[in-house]
């Protein structure tokens, strides 16, 4: 009984450590995947003189075996800036990043990440004037889902959101357990509206 009690105590003490490590890895993985997707989308738009839209959506635990976000990139088949769903073509498969959430500056205050906020608009707080669904144009059999958080890259590499051109666009991410956001473990990507280049801030 003594041995069992000691093992139980050790488990109770180490579980928060393992949970924290898992949460940190999930945020690191998500920020890396998202940063890569943004950079590749910008490069594609510039290389092919076209427009690319990167969409994000929050998923619930009941929807996809755990909470998280999904990321996808699409372009128009005629090179125009018209986001008509009938013209959109997938650039990549949909990425799923588990155990993370999209958050705004109110949930991750500036001092938490020591990042600039002047001239910055949070993607989580923008008005979703543009949505698109996946699969596109019958490119799959699953029911379509909407990506309501969208960044558009233009032929010059510039970035904008449905609210219009901004100096900086911020995507905040934090760890998430079920329906609870863990804002003590957060990161942010800020995308320049002028150049489309991004910078990462991590706790």
Image (cartoon, helix red, strand yellow):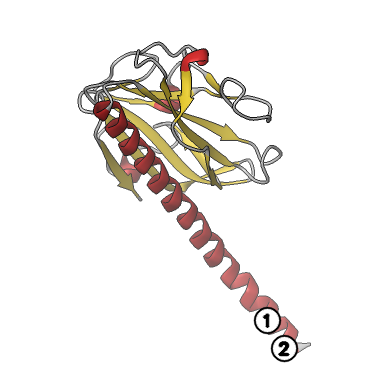
Q: Position of residue 127 (x, y in %)?
A: 46, 15
For this view, does 25 lie left or right of residue 159? right
Would you say the residues marked 2 and 1 are in contact, meaning their CB atoms lie under 8 Å apart?
yes
View extreme (right): residue: 1
**Residue at (38, 48) in percent of width and height:** 32
Q: Which residue is mark 1?
A: 7
In this rendered view, identify the residue nearer to me: 95 or 125.
95
Instruction: Sort mark 2 into few (<14), some (14-19) or many (20+) by Cα contacts within 10 Å.
Output: few
For this view, does 141 lie left or right of residue 23? right
Q: Based on the displayed image, in which of its 4 quarters is residue 140 positioned?
A: top right
Q: State whether residue 77 is above or below residue 196.
A: above
Q: Which residue is mark 2?
A: 3
Q: Position of residue 20 (x, y in %)?
A: 51, 60
For this view, does 50 lie left or right of residue 144? left
Q: State whether residue 197 is above or below residue 129.
A: below
Q: Position of residue 15 (x, y in %)?
A: 60, 67
Instruction: Sort mark 1 into few (<14), some (14-19) or many (20+) by Cα contacts within 10 Å.
Output: few
**Residue at (74, 84) in percent of width and height:** 4
Q: State whether residue 166 is above or below residue 3.
A: above
In this rendered view, identify the residue nearer to me: 69 or 91.
91
The number of numbered badges drawn on the structure is: 2
**Residue at (31, 31) in percent of width and height:** 44
Residue 26's disc number? none
Q: Position of residue 170 (x, y in %)?
A: 34, 31
Indicate the quadrant containing the N terminus: top left, top right, bottom left or bottom right.
bottom right
Q: Is label 2 in a helix, a strand or a loop? A: helix
**Residue at (51, 15) in percent of width and height:** 85
Q: Is label 1 in a helix, a strand or a loop? A: helix
The span from disc 2 to disc 1 (Cα, nearest Å) is 6 Å
Q: Based on the displayed image, in which of its 4 quarters is residue 139 positioned?
A: top right
Q: State whether residue 75 is above or below residue 37.
A: above
């Amino acid at each position: 009984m003594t041995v069992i009690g000691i093992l139980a105590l050790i488990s109770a003490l180490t579980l928060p450590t393992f949970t924290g490590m898992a949460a940190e890895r999930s945020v690191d993985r998500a920020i890396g995947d998202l940063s890569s997707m943004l950079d590749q989308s910008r490069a594609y738009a510039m290389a092919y003189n076209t427009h690319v839209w990167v969409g994000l959506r929050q998923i619930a635990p009941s929807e996809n075996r755990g909470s998280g976000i999904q990321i996808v990139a699409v372009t128009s088949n005629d090179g125009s800036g018209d986001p008509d769903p009938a013209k959109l073509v997938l650039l990549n498969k949909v990425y799923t990043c588990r155990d993370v959430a999209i958050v705004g500056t109110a949930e991750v205050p500036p001092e938490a990440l020591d990042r600039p906020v002047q001239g910055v608009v949070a993607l989580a707080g923008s008005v979703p004037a543009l949505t698109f669904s996946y699969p596109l144009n019958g490119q799959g059999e699953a029911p379509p889902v909407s990506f309501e958080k969208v960044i558009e890259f233009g032929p010059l590499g510039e970035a904008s959101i449905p609210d219009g051109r901004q100096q900086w666009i911020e995507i905040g991410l934090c760890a998430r357990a079920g329906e609870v956001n863990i804002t003590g473990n957060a990161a942010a990507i800020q995308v320049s509206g002028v150049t489309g280049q991004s910078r990462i801030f991590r706790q």
